[in-house]
Image (cartoon, rainbow, N blue to C red):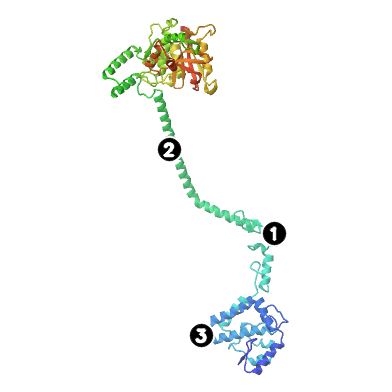
């Protein structure tokens, strides 16, 4: 048996094969897919393999499906092989004929071809002899379904239009339904819309709107899921903030209390006792340290109790006669001084164990009062009075408050001074002197009037207070003016005179209650040294506090003037 290389037909002899090949040579070769003609057989085979590779591959896949599905038995295997040969024959025969391919349902039931009929009739008519039988097997029906699925005309998935081939259908979809594709045609003159949330490009505004709505629904869903967690986080944040605020307020309150207690201790308002308690406590410390004999302790304690009982200072811190010694010195020495003006006689009082650290205001009042007691002009106001001790001064100020003097100052000190270590300043000195019918005034130098924070106007005011006539006066002038109470932040002193130097500069002479008696007594020596005056002299450059206040005595008040001053 011989097989045709063109169509796969088998013949029994060589003459029959020659006759069969003659039929191939006489008929025109036509492509079974695109109707191409006018080429030889080799060119047609090349054309089919290159231009219609996909369709040719489908033919082969159909043959493979036929083999796999129905090749389980020997009989079916022989029938399958024969059927596949028949299909191949029909495909190749189509290349040599103008007629279409033979379908699978045209096969006879026995699956064989009648070669004699094939060659006896026209080639076109020979392809039609394969007619379907009235009774088709299940295999034929399945093959027909698969074949129709593979080779049925393509249908548009959008408008259901049917095209002849897949290429036409692809062109149809790209041109008619470009707006429905993910990637529109590049040459299509349509507006493009970008999604503001993900950047997707849409060709239709309504599609974009639906797409964005999906984003919003997804976001809303996420927000709904996280709403409970966000609420919990907010509650936790609020709790943490409240706890932080509570700690901050507690810390601020504690700091304020500490500062307030510090100020109370500084100004003697911490209820730790007053002059008496501090005196006894400090003397006990001296005894414990071996610097005071116990007998001395008891003697001083007895003197203190006697002084407190009568309300008069015991005089153990007083130094007298300094003003007279200064007058003598300036007359006979002090060649660098052009003129000097001294106040009336003043006794110096310094701090003791009982008022150390807080009693400067009280000691300066003792100095000022000691000068007034030596001046006959004030006998009527101070008749029968002696220099009081510090607790007595505290009692006198409280009495002045009760009379109505300085209610604001009384309120600040809780209307109480006795039994405390409370500081006093210019206002309390003014209140006490006014209650004693002593005319005085407070002058406030609240800001600097010279370079580097100095107060030259303070010096000029004090000079004008002491020196009414500067020209023609002697070198040393002992005036009848009382000393001046000088106050600045944290301390107070007593001004007892002023120098005018050879270079026309001014220098104050001050008594400091912080200076002990042994230092002040050096001024009483006949051969006083210039170095001893160093503790008294204060030049303009030495007074650089931000603010100064002075209390200057100007005379005596009548009873009516005293009432008006309240």
Residue drawn at the location 51% of the way across and 9% of the way down: 467
Residue drawn at the location 63% of the way across and 68% of the way down: 157
Percent of width and height locating residue 131: 63, 86
Looking at the image, tell me whether mark 3 or mark 1 is earlier in sequence order. 3
Percent of width and height locating residue 461: 52, 14
Looking at the image, tell me whether mark 1 or mark 2 is earlier in sequence order. 1
For the N terminus, the image quarter is bottom right
How many residues crowd mark 1 within 10 Å: few (<14), some (14–19), many (20+)? few
- The residue tagged 2 is 247
Nearer to us: label 1 or label 2? 2
Check the image and name the residue furthest to the left. Answer: 295
Percent of width and height locating residue 145: 59, 78
How many residues crowd mark 3 within 10 Å: few (<14), some (14–19), many (20+)? few
Nearer to us: label 3 or label 2? 2
- The residue tagged 1 is 190
Check the image and name the residue furthest to the right. Answer: 38
- The residue tagged 3 is 73
Q: Is residue 184 above or below residue 292?
A: below
Q: Nearer the viewer, residue 190 or 57?
A: 57
Callout 1: helix, strand or loop?
loop
């Amino acid at each position: 048996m011989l097989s045709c290389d063109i169509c796969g037909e088998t013949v029994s002899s060589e003459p029959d094969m020659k006759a069969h090949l003659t039929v191939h040579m006489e008929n025109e070769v036509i492509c079974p897919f695109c109707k191409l003609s006018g080429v030889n057989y080799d060119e047609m085979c090349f054309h089919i393999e290159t231009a219609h590779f996909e369709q040719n591959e489908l033919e082969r896949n159909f043959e493979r499906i036929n083999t796999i599905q129905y090749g389980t038995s020997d009989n079916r295997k022989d029938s399958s092989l024969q059927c596949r040969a028949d299909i191949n024959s029909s495909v190749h025969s189509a290349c040599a004929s103008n007629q279409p391919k033979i379908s699978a349902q045209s096969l006879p039931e026995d699956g064989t071809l009648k070669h004699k009929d094939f060659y006896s009739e026209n080639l076109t008519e020979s392809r039609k002899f394969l007619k379907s039988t009235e009774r088709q097997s299940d295999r034929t029906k399945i093959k027909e379904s698969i074949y129709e699925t593979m080779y049925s005309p393509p249908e548009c998935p959008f408008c259901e239009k049917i095209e002849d081939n897949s290429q036409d259908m692809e062109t149809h979809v790209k041109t008619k339904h470009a707006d429905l594709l993910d990637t529109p045609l590049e040459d299509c003159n349509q507006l493009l819309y970008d999604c503001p949330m993900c950047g997707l490009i849409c060709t239709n505004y309504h599609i974009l709107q639906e797409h964005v709505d999906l984003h919003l629904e997804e976001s809303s869903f996420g927000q709904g899921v996280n709403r409970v967690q966000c609420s919990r986080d907010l509650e936790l944040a609020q709790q943490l903030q409240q706890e932080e605020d509570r700690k901050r307020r507690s810390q601020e309150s504690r700091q304020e209390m500490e500062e307030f207690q510090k100020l109370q201790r500084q100004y003697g308002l911490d209820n730790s006792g007053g002059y008496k308690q501090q005196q006894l406590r400090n003397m006990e410390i001296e005894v414990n340290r071996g610097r005071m004999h116990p007998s001395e302790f008891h003697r001083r304690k007895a003197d203190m109790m006697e002084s407190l009982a009568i309300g008069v200072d015991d005089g153990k811190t007083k130094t007298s006669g300094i003003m007279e010694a200064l007058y003598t010195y300036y007359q006979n020495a002090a060649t660098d001084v052009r003129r000097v003006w001294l106040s009336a006689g003043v006794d110096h009082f310094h701090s003791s164990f009982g008022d150390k650290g807080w009693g400067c205001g009280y000691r300066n009042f003792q100095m000022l009062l000691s000068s007034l007691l030596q001046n006959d002009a004030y006998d009527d106001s101070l008749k029968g009075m002696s220099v009081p001790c510090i607790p007595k001064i505290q009692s006198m100020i409280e009495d002045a408050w009760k009379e109505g003097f300085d209610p604001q100052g009384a309120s600040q000190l809780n209307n109480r001074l006795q039994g405390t270590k409370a500081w006093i300043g210019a206002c309390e000195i003014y209140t006490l002197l006014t209650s004693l019918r002593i005319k005085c005034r407070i002058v406030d130098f609240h800001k600097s009037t010279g370079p580097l924070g100095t107060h030259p106007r303070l010096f000029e005011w004090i000079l004008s207070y002491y020196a009414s006539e500067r020209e023609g006066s002697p070198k040393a002038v002992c005036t009848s003016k009382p000393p001046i109470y000088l106050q600045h932040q944290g301390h107070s002193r007593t001004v007892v005179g002023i120098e005018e130097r050879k270079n026309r500069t001014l220098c104050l002479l001050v008594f400091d209650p912080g200076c002990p008696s042994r230092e002040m007594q050096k001024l009483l020596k006949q051969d006083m040294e210039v170095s001893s005056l160093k503790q008294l002299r204060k030049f303009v450059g030495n007074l650089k506090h931000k603010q100064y206040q002075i209390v200057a005595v100007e005379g005596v008040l009548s009873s009516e003037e005293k009432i008006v001053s309240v």
